[in-house]
Amino acid sequence: MNYKVLIVADEPLARRGVRARLKSFSDFTVLEDCEDGFAGLNAIRRHAPDLVFLDVQMPGLSGFEMLKRLPKSQRPFIIFLTAYDQFALRAFEEHALDYLLKPIDAERFAEAVAHRLRHLVGNLDHPTVARLMGHEFTAH
């Protein structure tokens, strides 16, 4: 199965880094890169992605503010990206899959993508689970 991914971060370098690291995972397709929370919110509504890499702090609309504007039934799995560890507790209160600190370590990134998502496939309360049940991830 192919998993739909969005990258929402205001820094071009961060977006390129996530995109480049995802190339080693054949099951993931990046649908769109968004440079702010408003564009990210529109892209989520338009694409209904399975997974979003979401920056915490962005001009205009933060990652947390973005999630508040989405009904829980429309929320994809989220992996937060940030340079600050102080938002970790809040991220997990929002049921984030993971919380990656910038600069992102390649090994830690692979763990977040392959392992965290796999563990949550059994979470029947999440709206994305129905599309993901029974599929394994392959990294090259």
Image: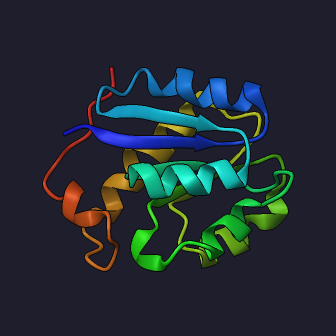
Report the side of 33 relative to 63 (left or right): left
**Farthest residue in the left direction?**
134
Colour mode of the rendering: rainbow
> Which quadrant would residue 133 be assigned to in this image?
bottom left
Front residue (pair 3, 42)? 42
Report the side of 51 relative to 131 (left or right): right
Q: Quadrant of the N terminus?
A: top left
Q: Position of residue 27 (x, y in %)?
A: 29, 33
Residue found 52% across the figure and 35% down from its top:
32
Q: In the displayed structure, would residue 139 be above or below residue 127?
A: above
Residue found 75% across the figure and 27% down from its top:
12
Q: In the displayed structure, would residue 129 be above or below residue 134?
A: below
Q: Quadrant of the C terminus?
A: top left
Residue found 66% across the figure and 31% down from its top:
15
Q: How many marks?
A: 0
Report the side of 1 relative to 90 (left or right): left
Q: Position of residue 127 (x, y in %)?
A: 32, 70
> Which quadrant would residue 60 be assigned to in this image?
bottom right
Q: In the displayed structure, would residue 27 be above or below residue 21?
A: below
Front residue (pair 15, 46)? 46
Front residue (pair 85, 39)? 39
Report the side of 92 relative to 114 (left or right): right
Q: Position of residue 31 (x, y in %)?
A: 44, 35
Q: Position of residue 52 (x, y in %)?
A: 52, 50
